[in-house]
């Protein structure tokens, strides 16, 4: 199990923006300025509260170093840490991680290595102002902690072969 350290920024929470369109977005980053990590082996996630008018660092989470070895146990803690995030931006992400992230209502977004976090948050702010792509529109209307409900509905229907 990997060690996790978490730093929350006081007075920088998701509710600090005007209106209801405030999203938590995670960025796999070593320097808190650029996306430069693979999701499964990322050591640090910078989590921003992004709204129409402001983008603020909300939280930084650090994990112990892990290898890119196909061991999916390391994904559990990372995905749990993303609770309430609309998306996670990373340099790369495996297909199993994509499935698990989507099942938890988190949209994985692959960007080029070194993508600037400030530019990415500005882009999301522009989308919030003008009209969001489907994944972002869905995230805006979802309440924090609310799952997509798709799997709950499937379970309620029962399983027949």
Image (cartoon, rainbow, N blue to C red):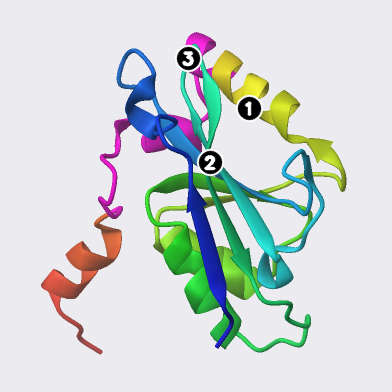
Which residue is located at x 74 percent, y 51 percent?
Answer: 29
Looking at this view, is 130 or 119 the one in front?
119
Asked if residue 134 can be seen in this view, the reply is no
What residue is pinned by disc 3? 52
Q: CA distance from mark 2 to mark 1?
A: 8 Å
Asked if residue 1 can be seen in this view, the reply is yes
Which residue is located at x 59 percent, y 25 percent?
Answer: 124
- Whether tag 3 and tag 1 are in contact, CB under 8 A, the answer is no
Tell me: residue 151, above or below residue 9: below
Q: CA distance from mark 3 to mark 2?
A: 13 Å
Instruction: Name the outermost residue toward the right.
Output: 113
Q: Earlier in the sequence, mark 3 or mark 2?
A: 2
Q: Quadrant of the C terminus?
A: bottom left
What residue is pinned by disc 2? 25
Horizontal arrangement in the rendering, residue 149 relative to residue 60 (left or right) = left
Horizontal arrangement in the rendering, residue 59 relative to residue 153 (left or right) = right
- Whether tag 2 and tag 1 are in contact, CB under 8 A, the answer is yes
Q: Residue 45's spot in the image, x, y percent? A: 62, 54
Asked if residue 153 is among those painted magenta in the image, a careful observer would answer no
What residue is pinned by disc 1? 121
Magenta stretch bounds: 127-148
Which residue is located at x 43 percent, y 67 percent?
Answer: 80
Q: Residue 22's spot in the image, x, y percent? A: 40, 27
Which residue is located at x 46 percent, y 21 percent?
Answer: 51
Q: Residue 79's spot in the image, x, y percent? A: 49, 66
Q: CA distance from mark 3 to mark 1?
A: 10 Å
């Amino acid at each position: 199990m990997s060690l996790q350290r978490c730093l929350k920024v006081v007075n920088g929470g998701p509710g600090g923006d005007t209106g209801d369109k405030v999203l938590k977005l995670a960025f796999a980053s070593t320097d808190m300025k650029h996306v430069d990590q693979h999701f499964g082996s990322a050591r640090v996630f910078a989590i921003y509260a992004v709204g129409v008018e402001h983008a603020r660092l909300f939280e930084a989470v650090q994990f112990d170093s892990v290898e890119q070895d196909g061991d999916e146990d390391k994904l559990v803690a990372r995905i749990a840490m993303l609770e309430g995030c609309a998306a996670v931006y990373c340099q790369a992400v495996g297909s199993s991680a994509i499935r698990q992230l989507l099942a938890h209502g988190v949209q994985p977004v692959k960007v080029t290595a070194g993508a600037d976090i400030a530019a990415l948050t500005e882009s999301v702010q522009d989308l919030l102002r003008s009209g969001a792509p489907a994944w972002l529109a869905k995230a805006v209307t979802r309440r924090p902690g609310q799952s997509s409900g798709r799997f709950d509905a499937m379970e309620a229907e029962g399983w027949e072969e």
